[in-house]
């Protein structure tokens, strides 16, 4: 984490500093998500109450550590909650736009956190509000088309949030840690070689039922036991962000199809599509198989499965019912 010899306390009590509001208004740089029709006008106009500080890189000659430009922890938390509410409200009608807007503004929130060296408890509260957004949007962008989704950037931002969260949780009383988020972090981490060790590191934060389920899921993933993997995954508490397991789901479904194509490779072997749907825990198994050159039918000729990947197959492999 970045460290400064003289920590600074932010004095900006609004979501966007006044100087930035004036600058962006005068240069026509107000985002559509920061506009409203206000007094019944046909046209969208800048709404200072909807404006949120944008992310800007540090540059020579600029001082990002001015107190008037930094928002204190309570304002940062209020800003995060506003952004997440905006996302929930607008995602159905204009997903790509609100997704990119919220990502940028959350990045600015984290920048303010770092520049002020916010206390561990405040940082934990803020991060635990925003991390579920990254898990959900990672899943949605993998399974649907999103023009503004950059997998590498999104992954980097999620990893940044998680690493800071782990660091801050270690410095606060245990009961402030969100067990739902811990469960989601373990699910997200399943493909990593350290997943089982990580689970045991977090054991004291989890109830025995959740711990046992997560351990079984990780072991099933490593053993390529896809039936047990999906059965146990869907037994995880509904409070947990199960979509955090999207990468593991994508990987094990592909392995499962590969195993099925080898186990039943005889030219005349056919399997009911319902059986494959059940094994893969996938409601749209016919659509998935079509991506691998299998004609739509109630009985699937296993030898016709072609394991060449494409964008549609990646998307359908990731779906969690």
Image (tube, rainbow, N blue to C red):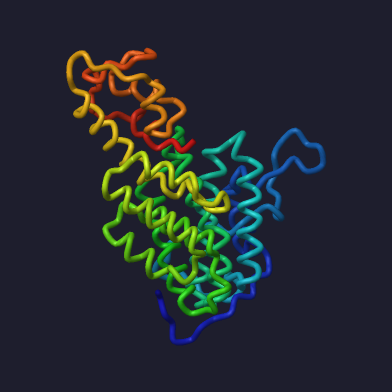
Residue farthest to the right? 39
Q: Is 255 situated left or right of 179 in this image?
A: left
Count of marks placed on residues: 0
Percent x, y for residue 295? Answer: 33, 13
* Residue 115 locus on image (x, y percent): 49, 74
94 and 260: which one is in front? 260
Q: Residue at x 37, y 43 (%)?
A: 228
User: Residue shown at 65%/50% (left/top)?
Assistant: 85
| Front position in the image: 130 or 56 | 130
Q: Examine the rendering and report whether any part of residue 280 can be seen.
A: yes
Q: Residue at x 32, y 66 (%)?
A: 197
Question: From what the image shows, is residue 134 above or below residue 147?
Answer: below
Q: Which quarter of the rendering shows the N terminus? A: bottom left
Q: Can you tell which quarter of the image residue 79 is in? A: bottom right
* 92 horizontally vs 160: left or right: right
Which residue is outermost to the bottom? Answer: 5
Q: Nearer the viewer, residue 63 or 302?
A: 302
Regarding residue 63, the answer to whether it shows in the image is no
Whole-percent x and y of residue 314? 34, 34
Q: What residue is drawn where x is 66% and y is 43%?
A: 89
Q: Residue 6: where, in percent of width, then height?
A: 48, 86
The correct choice, above or below, for 278 with respect to 86 in the image is: above
Q: Give the answer, above or below, for where 231 lies relative to 71.
A: above
């Amino acid at each position: 984490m970045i460290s400064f010899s003289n920590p600074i306390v932010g004095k900006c009590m609004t979501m966007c500093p006044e100087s930035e509001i004036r600058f962006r208004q005068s240069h026509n740089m107000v985002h559509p998500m920061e506009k409203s029709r206000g007094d019944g006008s046909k046209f969208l106009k800048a709404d200072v109450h909807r404006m949120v500080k944008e992310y800007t890189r540090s540059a020579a000659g600029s001082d990002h550590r001015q107190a008037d430009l930094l928002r204190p922890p309570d304002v940062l938390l209020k800003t995060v909650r506003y952004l997440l509410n905006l996302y929930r409200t607008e995602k159905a009608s204009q997903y790509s736009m609100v997704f990119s807007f919220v990502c940028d503004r959350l990045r600015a929130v984290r920048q303010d956190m770092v520049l002020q060296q916010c206390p561990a408890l405040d940082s934990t509260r803020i991060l635990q509000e925003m991390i579920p957004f990254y898990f959900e949007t990672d899943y949605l962008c993998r399974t649907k088309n999103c023009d503004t989704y950059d997998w590498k950037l999104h992954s980097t931002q999620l990893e940044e949030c998680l690493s800071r969260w782990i660091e801050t949780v270690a410095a606060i009383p245990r009961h402030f840690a969100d067990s739902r988020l811990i469960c989601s972090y373990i699910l997200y981490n399943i493909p990593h070689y350290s997943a089982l060790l990580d689970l045991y590191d977090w054991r004291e934060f989890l109830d025995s039922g959740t711990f046992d389920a997560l351990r079984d899921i990780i072991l099933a993933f490593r053993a390529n036991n896809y039936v047990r993997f999906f059965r146990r995954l869907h037994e995880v508490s509904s409070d947990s962000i199960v979509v955090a397991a999207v990468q593991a789901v994508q990987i094990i479904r592909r392995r499962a199809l590969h195993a099925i194509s080898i186990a039943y490779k005889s030219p005349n072997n056919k399997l009911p599509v319902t059986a494959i749907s059940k094994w893969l825990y996938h409601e749209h198994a016919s659509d998935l198989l079509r991506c691998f050159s299998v004609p739509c039918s109630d009985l699937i000729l296993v030898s016709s499965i072609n394991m060449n990947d494409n964008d549609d197959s990646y998307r359908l492999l990731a779906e969690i019912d």
